[in-house]
Amino acid sequence: MARVAVIAGDGIGKEVIPAGMAVVKKAAAACGATVEFVDFPWGCDFYVKHGKMMDDDGFDRLQEFDAIYLGAIGDPRVPDHVSVWQLILPIRQRFDQYVNLRPMRLVAGVKTPLAGRTPADIDMVCVRENSEGEYGGIGGRIHAGRPTEAAQQLSVFTRHGIERIARYAFETAMKRPRKLLASATKSNALNFSMVLWDEVVDGVAKDYPSVSWRKYHVDALAARMITDPAP
């Protein structure tokens, strides 16, 4: 039996999570498996009542589960940097959830800005680093409240972190029909962090000769995903 911690969170999370749980239960039953869901009331409503996004022993309690089923976090009553940095990102970092995996498909009957495209044309998977880079949380502010107030935010890239997400992406591409991979970079402007990214990805690519890959500047890639997403 799998034990799953459920954090429905805020807004639409409270709508979609019960539906998702129903689907998981049916899928598990079809496979002869069982899933136990345990709800936790953490999120912005919890913050408004208690001044914190989760209980103080929250991480220790989550550690006991096989998975965490998280809905949506965010509410106009709570600043985004509070809700994100007191719940979502600490969970990612504490449990080393370094892969953000997002399948992208068109759904029949749903309107899309991609004119002339059908569900058969779009079938991609986005593999995004989830715990380093801009999510490192390193920085600070000085001279608070004064005209000279300043803030600094550092993006942190490690060879270990880049290599493991790159390998995950190449392994994912290996299982895809066309074995294609695009690496999003901004090394033309970020001359240290993203140059390291490019170098590490290029090194990992040598272990996957059957995968066709190339790097794109992220702004160009964003445009291409609308103008020519299929190739």
Image (cartoon, rainbow, N blue to C red):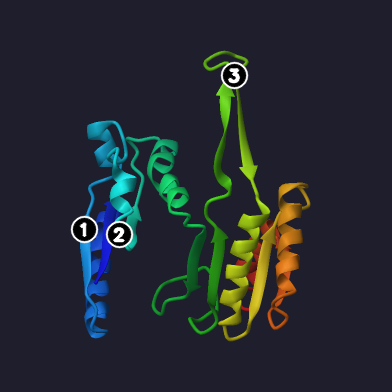
On the question of residue 114 being in view, the answer is: no
Amino acid type for the residue under numbered disc 1: Val
Q: Earlier in the sequence, mark 3 or mark 1?
A: 1
Q: As rendered, which of 226 and 97 lies closer to the eye?
A: 97
Q: Residue at label 1? A: 38
Q: Could you say whether the residue bearing mark 1 is in a helix, strand or loop? A: strand
- Measured Cα–Cα span from mark 3 to mark 2: 43 Å
Does residue 49 lie above or below 124 as drawn?
Answer: above
Please report whichever mark, 3 or 2, sits nearer to the chain's N-terminal start. Answer: 2
Q: Badges 2 and 1: C-beta atoms under 8 Å apart?
A: yes
Give the labeled residue for mark 3: 149
Q: Is residue 157 left or right of residue 42?
A: right
**Residue 74 drawn above or below residue 12:** above
Q: Nearer the viewer, residue 24 or 200?
A: 200
> Could you tell me how many numbered marks the image carries?
3
Question: For this view, does 167 lie left or right of residue 217?
Answer: left
Q: Which residue is mark 2?
A: 65
Q: Three-letter amino acid code at disc 3?
A: Glu
Element type where label 3 sits in the image: loop
The mark lying in front, picked from 2 and 1, is 2
